[in-house]
Amino acid sequence: MRQTALSILLAMTCLGFGASVSAESNTKPAAAADLTNRAALLSFTCAGCHGMDGASVGPASPTIAGLSPDTFTEAMQQFKKGERPSTIMGRIAKGYSDEEIELMAEYFSKQTFVPAKQEANTELVNKGKELHENYCAKCHEDGGTKDIDGSSILAGQWKPYLEMTLADFYSKEREAGKKMAAKLEDLQKDHGDDGVKALIEYYSSQQ
């Protein structure tokens, strides 16, 4: 009799433990799903300018799908602190908490980059490719298709966006890193505005 009671007690204890583990394992996926849903909802607020899931359909806004979380977060923090020139992004970025920015950064990093469809001048593209290899390839690997160490994705971005971004760097409104600033200066000195134009044509032409 005593043995039977002990068996029942052990069985109840095991069931209790199992129920506890089961509840915990169910809670974790639910919490992860909540964060994913929240990130997706936050991403909708960007769709007006950057397109659904970060694939821009407008020439002045970059595609942000596929950016590394670090690149996205750094950009948003710079906008928030007024360290990067913008028309409205500075005001928009201030509306997000650091946690929300991190959620969006993770969300957009998991979306597929969609290159912009736009016309290209083949002669300029070929010249731009050569300039890319000579001045930019060390940091912007694989033709600028990869976002490595904050290099961002250049290939397939809208041409007007690339023009405005480079204009900001050349005017010093936006600070470039030391190596990048030196390369941009060399490019301008060696090839002038035509070289800059060719480089933009190359990046924007890639699909």
Image (cartoon, rainbow, N blue to C red):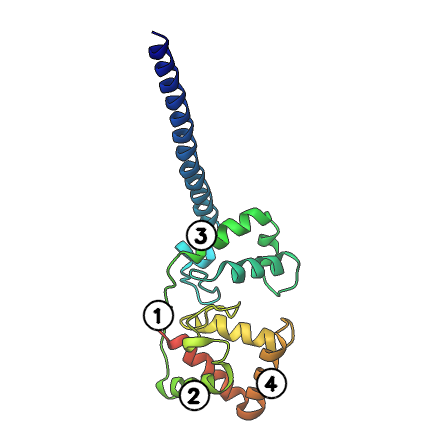
Viewer-nearest of discs 4 and 1: 4
Observer-side mark, 4 or 3, equals: 3
Give the image location of residue 55, x and y in percent.
40, 60
Answer with mark 4 or mark 1, whichever residue precedes in sequence: 1
Instruction: Specify the label residue 117 is tagged with.
Output: 1
Q: Is residue 179 visible?
A: yes
Residue hosting label 2: 130
CA gap, disc 2 to disc 1?
22 Å
- Residue picked out by circle 4: 185
Label 4: how many Cα within 10 Å (few below 14, some 14–19, many 20+):
few
Could you tell which of marks 4 and 3 lies nearer the N-terminus? 3
Q: CA distance from mark 4 to mark 3?
A: 35 Å
Three-letter amino acid code at the position of disc 4: Glu
Amino acid type, residue under disc 2 in the picture: Glu
Q: Quadrant of the C terminus?
A: bottom left
What label does residue 107 carry, if any? 3
Please identify the quarter of the rendering in which residue 13 is found: top left
